[in-house]
Image: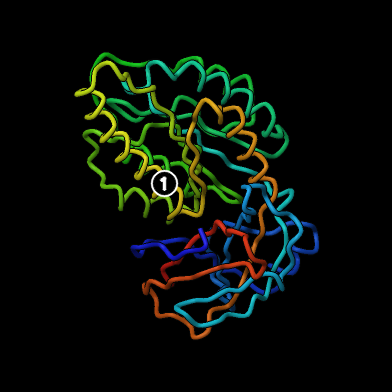
Amino acid sequence: MDAESPAPTYTGQMVATRRGFLVAAAVGGAWAQAPNFTADVDVVTVLATVRDRNGAVVKDLTRDDFVLEEAGVPQNIRYFYRELDLPLTIGLLVDTSNSQAHVLEPERKATLTFLERVLREDRDQALVAHFDVRVEVLQGFTSSRRALEAALARLSVPAKLSTLLYDAVRDCSEKSMKKETGRKAFILLSDGVDFRSKTSLADAIEYAQRADTIIYSIFFADALVPYRPLRSAVLAASRERGRRVMQRLASETGGAYFEVTKNDPIEAIYSRIEDALRNQYSVGYTPEPRAAAGQYRRIRLTAKRPGLVVQARTGYYAR
């Protein structure tokens, strides 16, 4: 969001040559989130989605419509362009713990439809992973819709109780996303309630950030049963904690939070995620003053036009 994150967490830095940026822009694309290159100019990039008061993606902004600050110091935006055609790398992280038993089938169907609409088989790729008592990648990165459909068909809920949500974000960030280039995003489907992970929430977020991967979190949970008030009260408290977890995972990685409701079904949410992925702005700058290696630097990207909300990362560790 356009407000600063409450706690310092890594939000990604790309190091690239000035010439490389200009060449990439000339051919209609560039690195919004990319690996690190040893070069003569350090360029920090921020990938942003902008929405209006109604939540619609804003697609007509220019460089002059943005204000960028690092550690409270205004920065000169040197590189700016819309990311319309850069390859997408998507990681689907599906909660298959016991609490998701009744929502798994609609998740499966909507996810397959989303992949069919979004993935271009000549350039985009996705993986499918699930987490419950373990974290397992059912299908590594592929452009094959048939392979992804087969992986989604294998999703099932085990009898044992465990929800390794934070471990899933950590493992898939470190082992899968970190080595990929281009625009990278997790789509996380869960009620946000972790149980028995060895990783903390803060560490899970940092792993995603260090892999330059944003998180679109989709909060999906069973409706509460009103005729069991005590149980409903316990579940409501747990659900609120899970909601806050999903919101934090999204906001601190530059993604977005969604909640499945009767009036906002998962199909509609996937449509908005697709719109966001296809209409992002890439903002690049050379920090002044330059930060020391390892130092955490807060960044704040806002839009000048009233009523607009910028969804972007909020800082980085200098290298």
Q: Is residue 2 above or below residue 51?
A: below
Where residue 242 appears, x then y in whole percent?
Answer: 33, 38
Relative to the observer, which residue lies in front, 284 or 236? 236
Residue projecting furthest to the bottom: 289
Q: Which residue is drawn at 69% across and 50% down?
A: 279
Residue projecting furthest to the left: 230
Is residue 24 visible to the viewer in this orientation of the structure? no
Where residue 261 appears, x then y in whole percent?
Answer: 49, 29
The quadrant the C terminus occupies is bottom left
Query: In the rendered image, which quarter is residue 10 located in?
Result: bottom left
Q: Is residue 154 left or right of residue 90?
A: left
Q: Residues within 10 Å of mark 1 (few under 14, many from 20)?
A: many
Q: Residue at x 58, y 51 (%)?
A: 181
Instruction: Report the amino acid beneath label 1.
Output: Gln
Relative to the observer, which residue lies in front, 231 or 311? 231
Query: In the rendered image, which quarter is residue 191 located in?
Result: top left
Relative to the observer, which residue lies in front, 45 or 229? 229
Q: Is residue 7 left or right of residue 266?
A: left
Is residue 73 visible to the viewer in this orientation of the structure? yes
Residue receiving disc 1: 247
Relative to the observer, which residue lies in front, 170 or 48? 48
Where residue 285 appears, x then y in whole percent?
Answer: 60, 74
Q: Which residue is drawn at 62% across and 54% down?
A: 49
Where residue 24 appears, x then y in whole percent?
Answer: 73, 62
Q: In this view, does 229 lie to the left or right of 74?
A: left
Q: Residue at x 40, y 62 (%)?
A: 5
Secondary element at image label 1: helix
